[in-house]
Amino acid sequence: MPDLLRVEGLSKRYIATQALDAVDIAVKPGEVVCIAGANGSGKSTLMKCICGAESPDSGRIIWLGKSYRRMNPAQAMRLGIQIIYQDLSIFPDLSVAENIAFHAIQAHSPLWVDWSAGERIAEEVLTSLGARLPLDARLGDLSFGARQTAAIARALTQDCRLLVMDEPTSALPAADVERLLAMVQRLRQRGIAVLFVSHKLDELFEIADRFCVLRDGRKVGEYAPAELDVKQLTFLMTGAEIHSDRTAPVPDTAPVLLEVNRLSRGGQYRDISFRLRAGEVLGLAGLTGSGRTEVALSLFGLNPPDGGLILVDGRETRITSPRDAVAAGIVLVSEDRASQGIFPRKSITMNIASSVYRRIQSALGLIAPGVERDIAGSWIDRVRVKTASSEAPAQSLSGGNQQKVVLAKWLATEPKILILDNPTAGIDVGSKAEIHEIVRDLAGQGHGVILISDEFEELALSCTRALVMQRGRIVHESRGEDLTAQRLSEVVRQTD
């Protein structure tokens, strides 16, 4: 079968960084090719060059036998190349049908809108994907999984022949991941090729016809799934052996740092009770909407409860703001580091020191630059942030290193209790292992950690105990031999 797409010798350089170095890749109709690589390997740059968002310095893109030195986005779309970015690029205030049929309606009649035709187009393409969505609902009011389904459906209305998906599962709960992978299978059956980028390696093995592995901008090789396992793929991506050690169990005699007693908030969660001991990593599992994040936000003062008690070191503590939480020794690392964790354009130094400005400023409200640099430099070393300069903007870092900066910022406050909400979402396997090691080190130093994660394997590996939440209540506790990824998955699905 002839190639649908072939890339030959593609190179791209950004000042001092060689993002792509003579990369070759080919894709056939109906083939699912998974692009695997650590952060900074060149995956996103390759995708952008194929879709016309970036222009390569050299090499060529061959589409159905015709050679192009570069493309622009409009040209790529006309040829049948569609990309779905992580932000989805939807119209949140328009309906599901309007989002899906937007381009198709425009092309059919630029002078007036045929609403009935739009709904018919949307219904047909959703049916072809095996999906159902309320066509008249405002898309911005629906779940991320629903919005993503609409984005895929919209791409198919534009004669899509190659769909590029950049980290499509990073913000999805397990049930929505299964639905997405089923949609990819349907695309394959229709002869639509897919370039799939994900840090979740287990998912890649479920759908890949072939792996293309990148490292430091170069292609390491191409492999059939039968040739590799997760450990071998990880080594090819990183060039190093990744070791995953379980967190050591905590004795029942360890001091109780945090006690939550019948905490409730109307419409979100109720009767939440648990204890967190020094050195413990307590997991919170459950589907999106189960109440996990809402409880975490309450403990950090962003979502005050209606009733119940919070005790820190045995003393009742009223937490109505993040300032109250930090004063009590509780910090929260949010899942959305881009908008809630870092100041993207500010320096790494400023980001890390920002949490302790009140402590280090003088009586006149001034901060000595040397003090700020010393604090930041110390934490950069301790959490191993990879950067050429502490004065570089935070947005210049990879996702994993941005997450380390967020951790460093809150660790600088010297907390007792850390709440981590999906701390490894959207980062590569090597950075994940480093974050897990930092969590184990913190537990070993006597901190208490609450870890919220959509990945059951992460919870089983990192936690000493895990609570499963469903519809705002704790429905199960796993510890010891019961704390496995398979067991957590079974309980979450049984209670859904």
Image: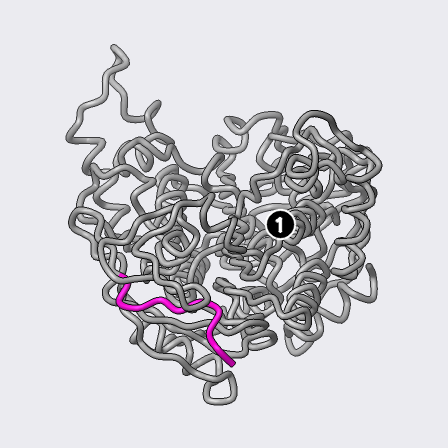
Most foreground residue, 78 or 379: 78
Most foreground residue, 218 or 288: 218
Is residue 299 depicted above or below 6 in this figure?
above
* Residue at the (27%, 60%) spot, across then down: 20
The picture quadrant where one finds residue 217 is bottom left
User: Where residue 210 sits in the image (x, y, percent)?
Assistant: 49, 78
Is residue 453 depicted above or below 289 in this figure?
below
Q: Which residue is mark 1?
A: 158
* Residue at the (17%, 46%) spot, across then down: 15
Most foreground residue, 133 or 79: 79
What amino acid is labelled 1 in the image?
Gln
User: Where residue 294 sits in the image (x, y, percent)?
Assistant: 68, 40
User: Where residue 443 sits in the image (x, y, percent)?
Assistant: 46, 59
Q: What SS does tag 1 mark? A: loop
Residue extending farthest bottom: 227
Q: Which residues are magenta?
A: 1-10
**Left of 292 or right of it: where is 339?**
left
Is residue 342 depicted above or below 23 in this figure?
above
Decide whether residue 477 is among the magenta residues: no
**Left of 40 or right of it: where is 417?**
right
The picture quadrant where one finds residue 393 is top left
